[in-house]
Amino acid sequence: MARRTIRGCMNEKWDVSTLSLLLMVSMRLVHVTAADSNETASTTAIEATPSTTMRMPTGYSQSCFNWTSVPEAAGGNCSRLTRSGLLKCYGGMNNLGALAKLGKSLPAQQMLLCGWPQDTSRFLGELQKLPRLRFLTIEYSGFTEFAFEFPEMSYLQSINISWTNLSYISTRTFKRVHTLKVLDLRWNQLIQLDGPLLLPRSFEQLYLAGNPWNCTRNFKWMLLQPEKGRLVVDRDELLCTDRKYKERQMLLVMHYKLELKKECQSHPDLRNCTCLMHHILPRTHIPLYTVNCSHMQFHSLPAYLPENTTTLTINDNLISDIKPLRDNPHYRHVVDVHLENNRISNVDDLENTFWLQNFRLFNLRGNNLRKLHVYALDNALNDNENANLLLLSKNPWHCTCKFGMRLRELLNQYRDIVRDAWNVTCTYMQDDELRLAKVLTLTRQDMCNVSAESGTQIHPIDWLNGVLASLIILILGKLAYDYYHYKYYNRVPWIVMKMP
């Protein structure tokens, strides 16, 4: 399968399955936008889309628009049964018993329930008084979940629960409704499903769009169980609303998750690692991956990473070599590397490399670093506009006179990037390796083993430099004096007159 890359993705070929997925996303988004505009202009609520083998009766209104103005809403009652067998209830079913004759059950075949209160404990008993019910619609209600399973209903074929506060539904809620063919759960507050709903074999259509789905949860069953996924008629219209995948198409997110899992499990280096997708780029729909291999006893960096991996966390291992950051093409998109608590003693291999000039985060805390090429790191940080965080503390740095001064200057200059600069310590006494001090607090006298008194004494070479500077000033002054006299008095220096 052709992989998608971050840089130069427009020049690469997409695989057929992914390209078709993206095409469906754009087409569905256009369809949803058009549908939303039509629904805004209309005063009727969304109806359950009928099955191809089951049509709603003509004139069957399912609208609860402005239901609180209906007289029956004040007492939570139902209106009289219409000739077509439609029963409308507003805010409750308190008069349901009075509407029945001689204690008999109502022959209602269709029911519209508007504004059912948050307490659903009575709903089950009232529903059983309508044994011939075929179509049930509940809209504009305040309940958040069903604390029961729907009872066996011999004729119930369609359930539409829309525009409610329903946020949780059990997979077993509709298991006993053996005649159910259509279930419409659009425009509620559902965040997740524990798994595919348990529905009868004759079930045909499930609608789930319009809910604030959290795509960090597991919806991979839509792709792993095609027979279940195909029942979700509007699966291409399901959009994520969580912070990580906001406004991304759910099927696309699940597709990338499955591909990543398959890719990581197929390579021996990554089988015990955790591979996650942490972002999808908005325009190109390219996924960005994180690979976590911490606490795995790795002795070297993984030789393979999934395409578009941008973050590698491999803390608390036994790694001493970081050459793959320089040579391995699988690391070309990796910008965040966490290598805390390993055995790295040398990072000079990264000098003048593309990775060091483009990294975003580099965590080297708790390794075995004693020295590094300060000038190379300085140049890299100066040229790298992406650098955001570099951690260098908890290493056994050894501050010689020259290296210590340069390291202190580097920490001061890039303190906004090296955010643990105040915690970077080093040894600075040759005879005492256990004597640690914070680099930013050390002076030149400390690192160069120069006493304060000797530091104020003038070195002989400084005397010589002073004498030479005085002679230069004297010569320049004499030259200016001779020039002045020649220009205004036409007198040349006496030494010129003595020359042959």
Image (cartoon, rainbow, N blue to C red):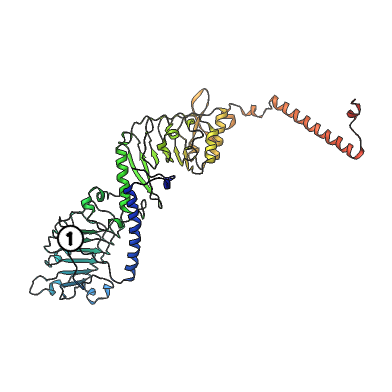
The percent position of residue 33, horizontal first and vertical second, equals 35, 63
The percent position of residue 3, horizontal first and vertical second, equals 36, 43
Decide which of 293, 414 is in the foreground and name it. Answer: 293
Can you see residue 118?
no
- Quadrant of the rendered structure where residue 128 is? bottom left
Judged left or right of residue 334, residue 54 is: left
Decide which of 129, 496 is in the foreground and name it. Answer: 496
**280 up-or-down from 312: above or below:** below
Q: Quadrant of the N terminus?
A: top left
- Quadrant of the rendered structure where residue 364 is? top left
**412 up-or-down from 136: above or below:** above
Decide which of 461, 355 is in the foreground and name it. Answer: 355
**102 up-or-down from 241: above or below:** below
Residue at point 51%, 32% (across, down): 437
Q: Residues within 10 Å of mark 1 (few under 14, many from 20)?
A: many
- Quadrant of the rendered structure where residue 129 is? bottom left
- Residue to which mark 1 is pinned: 181
User: Outermost residue toward the top?
Assistant: 431
The percent position of residue 333, horizontal first and vertical second, equals 42, 41
Can you see residue 44?
yes
**4 up-or-down from 314: above or below:** below
Decide which of 298, 144 is in the foreground and name it. Answer: 298
Kind of residue sitting beneath label 1: Lys
Q: Quadrant of the C terminus?
A: top right
